[in-house]
Image (cartoon, helix red, strand yellow):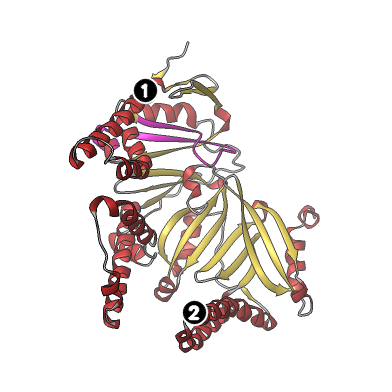
Amino acid sequence: MYNQNRLHPAVILLNIGKYVRNLFPLYMIILFNSYAILPFNRIINTSLLMLTFLGCISIGSIISWKRFLYEIQTDQLSVEYGLFMRKRRFIPKERIQSIQEAEDIIHRIFGLVKLQIETAGGSGEPEVVLGAVTREQAEKIRKELSHHFLYKDTEEEVQASPFSFRLSPKELLFFSATSGGVGIALSAVVGLYLQIDDYVHISLNVASFVAQTTSFYIMAICLLAVSVWIIGILILYQKYYDFQVIRKDADLIITRGLIEKRKLIIPLQRIQAVKVEENIVRQWFGFVTIRLLSASGGAEANEELSFICFPIVKKKALPIIFKHYLPDYTFCSSVQSLPKRSLLRYLIRAMVPVLFLSLICFYFVPMTKYIVPFLLAASIAVGYRQFKDTGWMLFNQQLFIVTRRFIRTTILVKRSRIQSLQTYKSMFQDNPMLCTIKVYTKSGLGSSTFNLKDVDDSVGKAIREWYSYEKQRN
C-alpha cells in the first residue's frame, strides 16, 4: 500500500499569486465597467470588488491544494487533482525524461522547491508540476524516479568533467544590454490607458502635443527608447542572475535566476542541434551566444524552442567550450562560401520589402522620398552582408549551416540527429543552377527547420548524398 502525499500549504499562496497574475486583466475590465453600479462611493466599491475577487481566488486555491494528491508507486507516478472534476493521471516511470527544479521568492522563504516532471512526447508543458515540496521530499522524489531516466539509452557514458562555467556580473550586464529592449511595454501602456481613462480621468491634449517642436519629438523618442532598453536590461539581468553551467557525467546542469531560481538538467543525448548566435554589437566585440535545441517537450523548451546554454562567451573560446561541455560536437571556424551568382538574389530579397513599404509611405507622406535612398542603401548593405556570411561545411559527421538575417547564426547538427533533409529549387533558381537545402531536426513536440538558400546544385547533391542511408550503410 502506497501513501498519498499532499503539497506544502505554501502552494496556496503560490496559486493565489498565479491566479491574480493571470486574471488581473479580466478583473480590471470588470472593475472599470462595474464599480459605478454599486451604491457606495468609488473607494468602497473598488474595495468590495477587490475583496470579492481575492476571496474567490483564495477559496479556489485552498480547494485545489486539498484535492491535489500524488504518490510514487513501484512502476509509476500517480497524481489526483481537479477543482470541479476529479482527475487521476498515471505516468509510467520509464516515460519520465527529466525533473527540473525552480524556486521563486515564496519557495525560498519556506525552504521549498517546485518540481517539473517532463516525459517523452509531452504536450509542450511539463507532464506534472509539484508546485511546492520540501527539499527533503524533492530529493526523495528525484532518487525514486531518476534512475529510470538518467543516462537512459546512452550508448557510451561521457566521462565526468571538472569544468564549470559561471557568468560574471560584468558579462551578464553586457549580455543584458546587447539583447534588445522590451517593445511590449509600449502596447501595455496604451492598453492600460484605454482601460483606466474613464476611471482616473487621464486627459491628453493632442493639439498641444502635435504643436511641439522637432527637438521635443526627438527627445521624447530617445527617452522612450532608453526607458524600454533599461527595462529589458533589468528583466534579463534578474532572469540570468548567477548563471552557471556544470558538466556532470552525461548531463549539463544549468542554474540561474534572481527572483525565480531555476535548475535545469539537460542530458547530452537529448541535444538535437547547437546554435551559435552573434548579433551586430556582440560580433564587433567578439562575443557569441550558444543555444541548445533539445528533444524535451517541457515548458522551458518553448523559449524559442531552445535553451540558452552559454549567454555570452568569447568566440575564440568556442573550441574549448565545445570540447569540455559539448564533446559530441566540434566547432569549425571556416565554411564554404556561396557562388557569386547568388549575390543578386540576396540583394533582391533585401530590397523588395523596403521598396514596397517606401511606395506605401510615399503615397501618404510625400516627404518619404528623401529617406528612401538611404533605406535602399541600407538594404543593399544588409543583403550583401547576408550573402557574405552564409555558408556551409561538412565536418566530423556534422553539418554546419551559417546564415544571417540581422543576427549571424551558425547551426551545428549531427547526421544522426537530422530527421529529414530536402533540396528543392524554384523556377528563378533553375537558370543560375542554384538550390535551397532544408534540414529538419526534432525540437519539443515538433521540429526545427534550417534553410540554406541559393547554394550551387552540386552542393545540394553532395549534402544529399552525405545524408543518404545508402552512403551511411557503406
* Left or right of 407 in this view: 155: right
Residue matched to label 1: 63
**The quadrant where residue 216 appears:** bottom left
The residue shown at (34%, 62%) is 176
Q: Nearer the viewer, residue 228 or 141?
A: 228
Looking at numbered disc 2 in the image, what kind of residue is underneath it? Answer: Phe
Q: Nearer the viewer, mark 1 or mark 2?
A: 2
Residue matched to label 2: 364
Residue 108 in magenta stretch: yes
Residue 214 in the image: state x and y as whole percent: 30, 82
- Give the residues drawn in magenta, as a range: 107-132
Secondary structure state at the residue bearing disc 1: helix
- Asked if the residues shown at circle 1 and circle 2 are in contact, with their CB atoms under 8 angstroms apart, the answer is no
**The quadrant where residue 66 appears:** top left
Residue 210 in the image: state x and y as whole percent: 31, 76
| Mark 1 crowdedness (10 Å alpha carbons): few <14, some 14-19, many ≥20 | some
Query: Residue 79, relative to residue 13: is it above or below?
Result: above
